[in-house]
Image (spheres, rainbow, N blue to C red):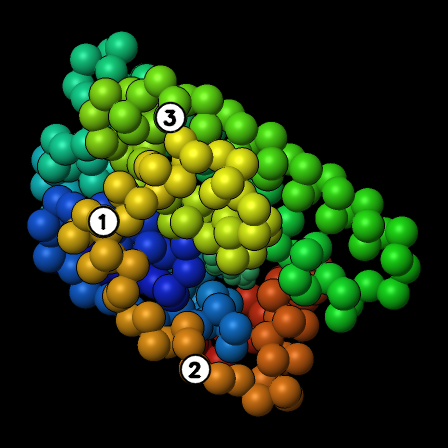
Amino acid sequence: MIDVYYWPTPNGWKVTIMLEECGLEYRVHPVDIGFGDQFKAEFLRISPNNRMPAIVDDDPPGGGKPLAIFESGAIVEYLADKTGRFLPKDAAGRYRVLQWAYWQMANLGPMMGNANHFKNYAKSLVTDVAQLEYGTKRFVGEVDRLCGVMDAQLSANAWLAGPDYSIADMLSWPWAMLLEKLIDDQVWTKFPHLKRWVDEVGARPAVQKGRQVHREWGERKLSDDEERARRELLFNQTNDKVRKAREDAAQAGR
Ligand SMILES: N[C@@H](CCC(=O)N[C@@H](CS)C(=O)NCC(=O)O)C(=O)O
């Protein structure tokens, strides 16, 4: 059985999508990141970066103790190796896929996260308009460039890493499908090959199922006070605060 530490966000969906695609059995544990579950001692032992998703596999290949893994890219790559699916075994195929998997982890995810922050959240946090404009231009511009990279790749290939559907698609789709909503309402007109791929990946039953896992957790309407507390927790993480949260959790035995 695979235990999944999860909240319904793009990085969480990558893992539930892969588990659904592989038909693996899993059990979901909520990590409510707006309310500090990521600082609980038990979770930090699995995921020291206080971020979800993470997994624990009690039946790792080759036997042995349960295996804990954090970082969505590492988790999905592990599941591909465990099942022998969605990641070719020959070196050329494997690295054709892995380069796009790492591309997503280092580029599309972080840049979209920052672009979303500046476009949709920073207004309520930053008073200096120049700062806001610079951050928005920098990250939205970078996302636009990345969309062009994907669009060019998808104009010549059925899937992101070439001829076959792979973990590169599963890692990139949960972010890419939010482009129109979060970053640029013209994105599909500008990048038609990207749109074609977003629709095709999104039509897969396993993708739809993985995307729906505990969707209701993320859709609960928060009160103004709860929303303020959530932003303070998520957007103001200094080393001192994180260390204190870690120590408080350890002391409380949580
Ligand atoms: N690179 C990490 C990013 C994970 C990540 O940023 N997770 C967010 C939710 S999407 C989180 O857990 N945030 C909690 C926090 O900021 O404290 C991955 O792909 O697993």
Q: Quick one: which residue is furthest to the front in this view?
A: 189
Secondary structure beneath disc 3? helix
Q: Is residue 172 left or right of residue 252?
A: left
Residue 220: image tag: 2
Residue 86 can be seen, yes or no: yes
What residue sits right under mark 1 in the picture? 203
Q: Is residue 138 above or below residue 43?
A: above
- Of tags 2 and 3, the one toward the viewer is 3
Q: Are marks 2 and 1 in contact (CB under 8 Å)?
A: no
Please tell me how crowded label 2 is: few (under 14), some (14-19), or many (20+) other residues with Cα within 10 Å: few
Classify the position of the N terminus by image quarter. Answer: bottom left
Amino acid on which disc 1 is placed = Ala
Identify the residue at image location x=58%, y=84%: 226
Q: Cβ of disc 3 within 8 Å of ligand 1?
A: no
Amino acid on which disc 3 is placed = Leu
Q: Is residue 114 left or right of residue 180?
A: right
What residue sits right under mark 3 in the picture? 154
Q: Is residue 59 above or below residue 29?
A: above
Amino acid on which disc 2 is placed = Arg
What is the CA distance from the residue labelled 2 to the residue labelled 1?
A: 26 Å
